[in-house]
Amino acid sequence: MGTGIPTGTATAITTTGMSMADAPAPLVADAAGLYRLMTWLTASFPVGAFSYSHGLEWVVEEGTVRDVDALVAWLDDLLILGSGWNDAVLAAAGWRASAAGDWAVLGEVADLAAALTPTAERRLETLSQGRAFAAAIASAWPCAAVDRLRARGGDLAYPVAVGAVAAGHGLSLPATLLGYLHGFVGNLVSAALRLVPLGQTDGQRALARSEPLVLATVARAAASTLDDLGGGAWLADIASMNHETQYTRLFRS
């Protein structure tokens, strides 16, 4: 059982994905930009990503995800028509508004991203990480974009914060999206290693198998507008709702 995507959709999109050797030049950040993305979007950055499973804990508990094949199918669905896709669209919108210095539009994107969260735990996940990301950036990697985001107050979803800050530091949109989605997939694989459980080698297999679809999603999202928001991965949303009352939990979502 997947998250609501028609059978074969993930396969069709995955086979159109690129390898890193085939990726267009803008996808690869310069040395300083790559260093920043690696710092901001890995587990060591203080946003608490390790404490969230994005509903995965529930689907492991009830038996939907039991092995590496089921995990990859779950990730594929999120990237095609679920939260992975929508986060990428929102990150792209935040990047464009920040790059243009249009702080009013950036505020609107931030408000929209917060309003779109389908469950209480998913809202906690994205807003807590967004606030933590902005605070860490302001302390160690300051830029005008993060100052504007913090000054406006209100809710700040994680993908919008990442997109806006990356633009504020002059990073390209494709590189930003690649870093964000790599972190998104990597965090869920890390959660699965503890929950299923899977071995370290299976975790690497999952990351390797997700690479073509991540690259294809980057290309789609880089050309997206807010009109492209939406999806059909409703079982992932239901999993998040069920996690709210799950008796035994390791994760916050």
Image (tube, helix red, strand yellow):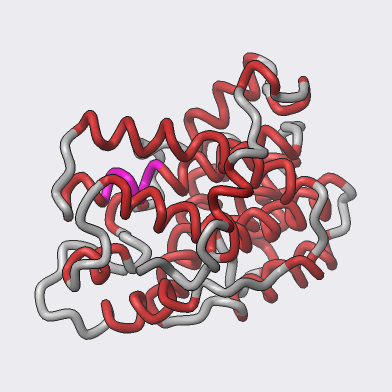
Please name whichever residue, 53 or 102, is drawn nearer the observer in this view of the structure: 53
Residue closest to the far left: 248
Q: Nearer the viewer, residue 68 or 95?
A: 68
Q: Quadrant of the C terminus?
A: bottom left
Report x, y in % for residue 245.
Answer: 21, 85
On screen, residue 21 above or below 191: above
**Which image quarter is the N terminus in?**
bottom left
Q: Is residue 91 left or right of residue 241?
A: right
Residue 142 visible in image: no
Question: What residue lies at 33% left-to-right and 32% top-to-bottom?
Answer: 205
With 199 as the anchor, is 102 left or right in this view? right
Residue in view at x 57 percent, y 41 percent: 214
Looking at this view, is 121 or 189 the one in front? 189
Among the 4 quarters of the image, the one containing residue 9: bottom right
Relative placement, left or right, of 187 versus 163 is: left
Asked if the stretch drawn in magenta spans residue 238, the answer is no
Q: Position of residue 166 (x, y in %)?
A: 68, 40
Furthest residue toward front: 8
Instruction: Give the dominant element type of the magenta stretch: helix, strand or loop.
Output: helix
- Residue 63 percent coordinates (x, y): 19, 67
**How many circles with numbers are drawn on the protein?**
0
Residue sitting at 50 percent across and 28 percent down?
38
Magenta span of residues: 186-191
Residue 122 appears in the figure: yes
Residue 65 lies, in percent from the top left, at 26, 60
Residue 189 in the magenta stretch? The answer is yes
